[in-house]
Image (cartoon, helix red, strand yellow):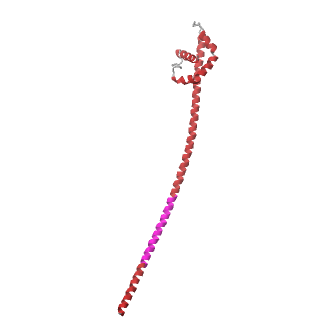
Amino acid sequence: MQLKFIHKVSFEIHNNFLFPFSIENHKMFDKFKKEEGEEMVEERMEENTGISESVESTPNTESSIGIGELMGKRAKLEEAIDYVGLMIKNLKDKRTVLEKDIEEESVDIKNLKEKLQKVSEYIDEENRGIQELANKRIKVENEADEVATIINNLREKLSGIDTIVGEEGNRVKQIKESRNSLES
């Protein structure tokens, strides 16, 4: 009975050119018919039962003024407006859910951004640590070069002393040999 009434409302509204399409045949409205639309129409039917039935039950004889038909059209228009109102409410509810989802995503993204900021800070700290180690290594390497230079200098000095000692040793040997050859 409820869906039949919706069909009747949408058909008559369509025939009177209030909407360029039939609400029942338009896919956009299918969800509302199946979910909350039935309840809405049922409530509205209970409120307007006397009016709807009296308009439908009156014979098709047209009155000269047509107040009965006008009341029937008004009731059907109210039904269509209630239906559109239900659609608007559903859209608002969906938008509210989407806003909530977006806010949750925003919070999650902010948390991820904070984590990435901490990772970035850690990387910067590690880079500073590596640079400090590189600077220390350079200092140690410079000290090692200084030690190598000192060692080379000392080696040269020792080599000079060794040469002097060697030459003096050779002279002493020559003097001894020449004495021995003179004594013999």
- Give how far across and how far down residue 113 sits, in percent: 55, 44
| Image: magenta residue range | 132-161
- Give how far across and how far down residue 66 sits, in percent: 59, 9
- Give how far across and how far down residue 49 sits, in percent: 63, 15
Q: Depth check: give the residue in front, 146 or 112.
A: 112
Q: Depth check: give the residue in front, 133 or 71.
A: 133
Identify the residue at horizontal 35%, vertical 91% (top origin).
Answer: 181
- Give how far across and how far down residue 73 sits, in percent: 58, 14
The secondary structure that dominates the magenta segment is helix
Q: Quadrant of residue 167?
A: bottom left
Identify the residue at horizontal 52%, vertical 24% (top origin).
Answer: 28
Identify the residue at horizontal 61%, vertical 22% (top origin).
Answer: 39
- Outermost residue on the bottom side: it is 183
Whether 4 is drawn above or below 107: the answer is: above
Whether 67 is drawn above or below 174: the answer is: above
Q: Is residue 140 magenta?
A: yes
Q: Quadrant of the C terminus?
A: bottom left
Label count reads 0
Q: Quadrant of the N terminus?
A: top right
Whether 66 is drawn above or below 94: the answer is: above
Q: Is residue 156 left or right of residue 133?
A: left
Identify the residue at horizontal 51%, vertical 23% (top origin).
Answer: 27
Q: Quadrant of residue 114?
A: top right
Whether 127 is drawn above or below 46: the answer is: below
Q: Is residue 49 magenta?
A: no
